[in-house]
Image (cartoon, rainbow, N blue to C red):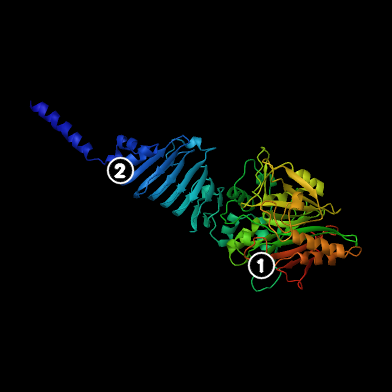
Amino acid sequence: MKKFRMIFAIIMATVLLFADLPVAASAKSLLVNEVSTTRELKAVLKEVTEGRINIVTGSRTKIKIPVGDYSKIDFLVDAPKATISNRGRIKSLTVGETGVLTAKYGDGGLTIKNYGEITTLKVKVKTNLTIAQDGTIGTIKLYDPANLNIKGSSTEQLKITVKKAAKDAKIVSSVPAKIKRKTDKKSAEDDAQSLFSAERLQTMASIKKLTDYDELNIYTMEVFYDYNLDNLTPVGMYDNQAMLNTILEEAMPGVGANITAPQYGCSAFTLKADDGKVYMGRNYDFRFDSSAMQVYCHPKDGYASVGYAALDNLGFNDPFASSANTAACLAAPFVCLDGMNEKGVSIAVLTLSSEPTAQKTGKPVLATPILIRVVRDRAATTKEAIDLIAQYDCFATSGRDYHYYITDASGDGVVVEWDCEKADRPMVVTPLRTITNYYAMYEDQVEPYKVHEKYGRGRERRDHIEETIEAAAGNTSLTTAWDAAKSASQKPDPTSIVSNTQWTVIYNNTDKTHEFVLHRNWDDVFKFDKLW
């Protein structure tokens, strides 16, 4: 009996010893705190107020973290294909630390939609991660070279820390972001080098101010970095934000920036002058005032060119107001609104009133501003430009529709547009000397000073240009081109998106030079003889 009592005492002592251990330390509690569905997560959150919860699933599923205070809980997410939505207040959320599904992250596409508050979001796996930031995130820390795509409505600046092991991480952000990269050298110069290549730093250093107006000015820059046009024309890209992210990744890989999709008004014409020259005249009209950035490009595998971008489309008008503004100018080559290349091909984009074009035949997609880049880089004649465009599905950005005016050194001027009366939006090419903001193919149905619901407006501006050219018949010259452009220029009208001439440019397709006026300052004509 004494021996039995001793054995019983030992057993009871052992039970009491393990009973005193924290619940989270047992294998059973760790299993309870691992979830793979929203229902399981909600059940655990009713019982757990601190510690750790693992969200583990290999399924393409949606898991919702409900409203609540979880400031004492660490969430570990191992879900390569899932969408995690958070509406709670979270201490930390770590992606990829459990190691259970890490091997499956290679082609993964985890999405985190944050509507609540996350103090720290850590990424500890190489993956493709999309963050929809509509709440608050204190800090994002990258420990592995992930591809991070951040979008959303938040206006608060995100703090992103990139650890040394994640130095090859690629970050694209359409919300404000400040990125700090951990390097061996701590100087500001070394930080800049870690963010930008030497060619991109050289490009930013080339930016100069050409005018000294009170607020809005002309700036110039030269592009020294290489870019790949094929990266800018992926199959299936029919989203404005996706287009912007693609531009940002090509212009400034790994750097957060914020730009908006450009919009455009305008008039354009070709003048085969009696002085033997071919000119393309162009008014860029848009309701909101903007500075202009003159952009010189000489791509490794393309034609050198010059073009103009509206800095307002990059979110500012002074590139020197902040280092962020200067860096954002790296995207200027991909948001130009008109331009001319070394072969004498000129192009301009003009807005229309129809529903936006979105061809879907399985070809690579050519978004509005990229089309202008592709033509200038790759076309030596108007015909080559037409043949190039036909190789793509065209996508009109910013919720508006557009057409393009293209001419070359021979004076072959055409309008390229997509028939709004047909569901598949086939491309139509119309030879024409002058065009504004209406369909060339339906010109006979658009009246001066009237807006056609579908076919557009601006017939009166076309008439002014044509009358000016005809009046100078037999004696046309560069002066005639300027007179024609002036006749169609517009003063501000807050009711019209295509009013307010921001700039006028006359491209000399024969000599490959051009002249430029900002905001109808007709006495200040800037002449540019620089070729490339």
Badge 1 crowding class, 10 Å Cα cut-off, few under 14, some 14 to 19, many 20 or more, is some
Could one spot residue 462 in this view of the protein? yes
Residue type of the residue flagged with mark 2: Lys
Which secondary structure lies at badge 2? helix
Badge 2 crowding class, 10 Å Cα cut-off, few under 14, some 14 to 19, many 20 or more, is few
Q: Earlier in the sequence, mark 2 or mark 1?
A: 2
Which percent across, then down, holds residue 401? 66, 51
At 51% from the left and 38% from the top, the residue drawn is 105
Give the residue at mark 2: 46
Q: Quadrant of residue 283?
A: bottom right
Residue type of the residue flagged with mark 1: Pro
Quarter of the rendering occupied by the N terminus: top left
Q: Which is more foreground, mark 2 or mark 1?
A: 1
Cβ atoms at labels 2 and 1 below 8 Å apart: no
The image's mark for residue 492 is: 1
Could one spot residue 302 in this view of the protein? no
Q: Is residue 170 left or right of residue 140?
A: right
Quarter of the rendering occupied by the C terminus: bottom right
260 and 377: which one is in front?
A: 260
Q: Is residue 322 left or right of residue 27?
A: right
Can you say whether 384 is above or below 292 in the image? above
Which percent across, then down, holds residue 397? 63, 50
Q: CA distance from mark 2 to mark 1?
A: 60 Å
The image's mark for residue 449 is: none
Which secondary structure lies at badge 1? loop
Furthest residue in direction right, as rendered: 474
165 and 363: which one is in front?
A: 363
504 and 352: which one is in front?
A: 352
Which percent across, then down, holds residue 341? 78, 54
14 and 223: which one is in front?
A: 223
